[in-house]
Amino acid sequence: MISIRIWLLLCLCVIASLASAESGSKIIRSHGIAMYGEPKYPADFTHFDYVNPNAPKGGTFRTGATGTFNSFNPWIDKGTAAGSAAHESLMTSSEDEAFAYYCLICEQVEYPEDRSWITFSLRPEARWHDGQPITPEDVIWSFNVLVEKGDPFWRVYYSDVSEVIKTGPSKVRFQFKLAGNRELPMIVSSFPILPKHYWEAEGRDFSKTTLEPPLGSGPYRITDFEEGRYLVQERVKDYWGSHLAVNQGKNNFDVLRTRYFRDRIPLRLALKSGDLDYYFENTAKSWATEFDIPSVRSGWLVRETVHHSAPQGMQAFVMNLRRPEFKNRNIRKAIILAFDFGWTNQKIFYNQYTRSESFFSNSELASSGIPEGLELEVLNTYRDRLPSEIFNTPFQLRETGSQGWPRENLLEALDLIGETNYEIVDGKLFDPQGRPVQIEFLLYSASFERIVLPYIANLRRLGIDMSVRLVDRSQYINRLRAFDYDMIVSGWGQSESPGNEQRNYWSCVAADQPSSRNQSGLCDPVIDELIDQLVIAEDREELIAVTRALDRVLLWHNFVVPNWHIAADRILWWNKYDRPTIPLRHGVNTSRWWYDEEKDRQLEAAWDEGLVAQDSASSSPTTRPTGWRLILLIGVIVAGIMIIRKTIRQRTREVD
């Protein structure tokens, strides 16, 4: 009995202690949540500042995409999925704040100051497209199935969530393993909520690809498609969330139509001929040379550079550190030196780009110079485990001229190779085991060949034998997921508030996880610890300092050949749409655009009158021959036929 009494007393003490702690902890109840401080918009806001709440609904928005699709399940690591606007999350972000979320499926959130958990209260009006309500069971099932059967990314991204439980008829709580991760309550609010009753129906397997348009709850639903060719989404007329402040002035088009093309050449022709309404250009040469056409000069086809302040992250030629060719750091540095960006930028890119020297380019998060202040304090913790250059040498890529012969770079690369036990024999580089250094560069886009081929010529001057392997997109994706490559072109986008996603980019766990974004196979305990420190940063100042330290350590690993970036979106669109004049910090967002019926009538009249002319170099088979152009075309054909008939008669007489 004594032991039982003592046990009961201890239990009561523990319960009392927990109750005391709970009562002493401030619980925040809100319509939104920000990384630091309070959200910009109050609980009674009616719309975001950057939209037109009175934007008319209607019209069709036709865009193009390269590649193909064979699935409508984008949450697994199988198939090539088409994106859609059919699914929503618990909260949605704003475009004019660094990092803030507002309730969408939920109507209120609750969380303690230490952010050790968060509870979502679901809106009673939230519905699936079949009319059934969205429930806490849907939220719990969605989270569990993504972690258990979805892309491995979800497992890494939400590894700090200990459990998800229903706490009321319309409430669901996410409990976290550790307190202090300020970002985690926000990222659990952004995963897609899926209908449990739909996916658990007989015959459906979430782990497999499907071409059955899945049930959603968003502003659009898939209504028509042809595998690999086109996708049509129509606006849901009775969409349950149309009245919400976060949706005002958005999702204005009645129909979203996406056509798929093998590459960008026919895609551009489809735009010029009027078969597409909008196009995002990502090739400098095409932007500089292919759109000086009458329809652009007359203003019917708008060609626009939209500058922004969004972080550009890092695009790079990525070395797979799992391969023996890249184990030696000096060899990797030599490979980086062989890339002639100066010549490439002038001859291929028309001087449109800036060389990237950070994994957080175009932001205050990028490291520069020599570490100092709070960043130096962070790095000093790991001084005995980091290269000395990090503390006394600024990371700076060597500049090259425009002659196409980076002699100084190549000489420095040869010096670095000379410091290793690699040998150059008869112009070929051999590793310590006597194997020639051979690298295969895997590509799926032919447009990158013109960039890589000159780079190969420079590498061969160092004795490195590199070849290019061009494969179709499906094969590329499969090899990417299996880390079956030597080098690839890839990139890591970044937000203004980096956090948990960095684990999927750089952690040792992700390096061994197929389909993760750690495509380089980088594994460094210091980086893992910096990421842990990053996700629990208590304020913006600490976040910036730790991010800069992480950036600096990543750069000095020399596992990528940094590419380039431009702080602008290059877009073309037929002048039958309108949009708010307020610019967005993250660039173009067409969800706030709307169809202008009067502009469309004017554009159609211009087509009919032959005013939307194309020059001969850029015209396509689908260019509309109307008016006097049609008469001229018929005349040319008739004249051609008469000439051919006359020639045949003359030759017949000569034979006779």
Image: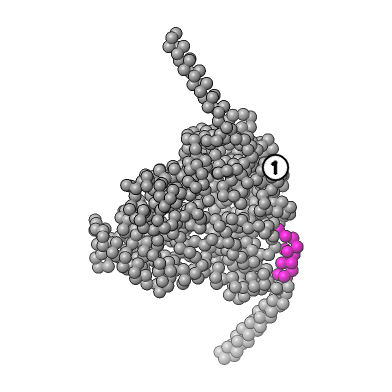
Camera-side residue of 364 and 157: 364
User: In the picture shown, does residue 38 fall above or below 278?
Assistant: above
Can residue 239 be spotted in the picture?
no
Is disc 1 surrounded by few (<14), some (14 to 19) or many (20+) residues within 10 Å?
few
Residue 91: which quarter of the image? top right
| Residue 341: x %, y % from top left | 43, 66
Looking at the image, which residue is at 58% across and 66% down?
268
| Residue 571: x %, y % from top left | 60, 63
- In the rendered image, the quadrant that contains the C terminus is bottom right
Marks counted in the figure total 1
Looking at the image, which residue is at 55% across and 72% down?
289
Residue type (three-letter) at the residue carrying disc 1: Asp
| Residue 63: x %, y % from top left | 61, 59
User: In the picture shown, does residue 40 fall above or below 446?
Assistant: above
The residue segment tinted magenta is: 595-608
User: In the picture shown, does residue 450 fall above or below 217?
Assistant: below
What residue occupies the far top of the structure in this picture? 1
Can residue 168 be spotted in the picture?
yes
Q: Which residue is mark 1?
A: 44
Looking at the image, which residue is at 24% across and 56% down?
433
